[in-house]
Amino acid sequence: MLTHLLNKDDLRSLLMHLAQPNLGALSLSAGALRGANQWAIAAGLVEPQGLTTAGTLVATKDPYLETTVTDWWFLFKPWVNVDSYF
């Protein structure tokens, strides 16, 4: 269950850190990291091993999380099992 509001800046920082770990330490508070991680997992962008295919796609093609497709993904994916349709 999602308990934090979606904060795109925190989520973007997390995705960039996972996509490019050589950037150094991640500068998020514990609460911000928890919220970003919660949304990233719910949206299917990360798994314990790192970025998923969808996470890599978002991190490389929409690094600022600005496209309409990315917005819809965050609205749709956490609430519906998209994989069951394919």
Image: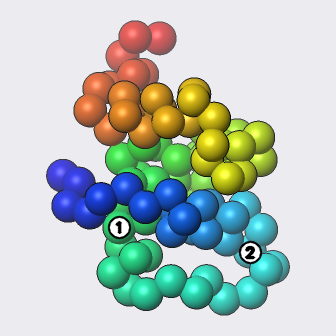
Q: Residues within 10 Å of mark 2 (few under 14, many from 20)?
A: few
The residue carrying mark 1 is: 35
Q: Position of residue 53 (x, y in %)?
A: 64, 40
Q: Amino acid at mark 2?
A: Pro
74 or 55, which lies in front?
A: 74
Dividing the picture into quadrants, the one containing residue 25 is bottom right
Q: Is residue 33 visible in this depiction of the protein? A: yes
**Mark 1 to mark 2 CA distance (whole Å):** 20 Å
Q: What element does badge 1 sit on?
A: helix
For the point 67% across and 71% down, the residue is 17
Looking at the picture, does residue 56 appear above or below residue 34? above
Which residue bears the numbered disc 2? Answer: 21
Residue 34 drawn at (x, y percent): 36, 73
* Residue 37 in view: no
**Above or below for 50 versus 75:** below
What x and y, as percent, mark residue 64? 67, 53
Which type of secondary structure does the marked residue at label 2 adopt? helix
Q: Which of label 1 and label 2 is nearer to you?
A: 1
Q: Is residue 14 left or right of residue 61?
A: left
- Kind of residue indicated by mark 1: Gly
Residue 70 percent across, percent down from the top left = 56, 36
Q: Which of 36/41 is in front?
A: 36
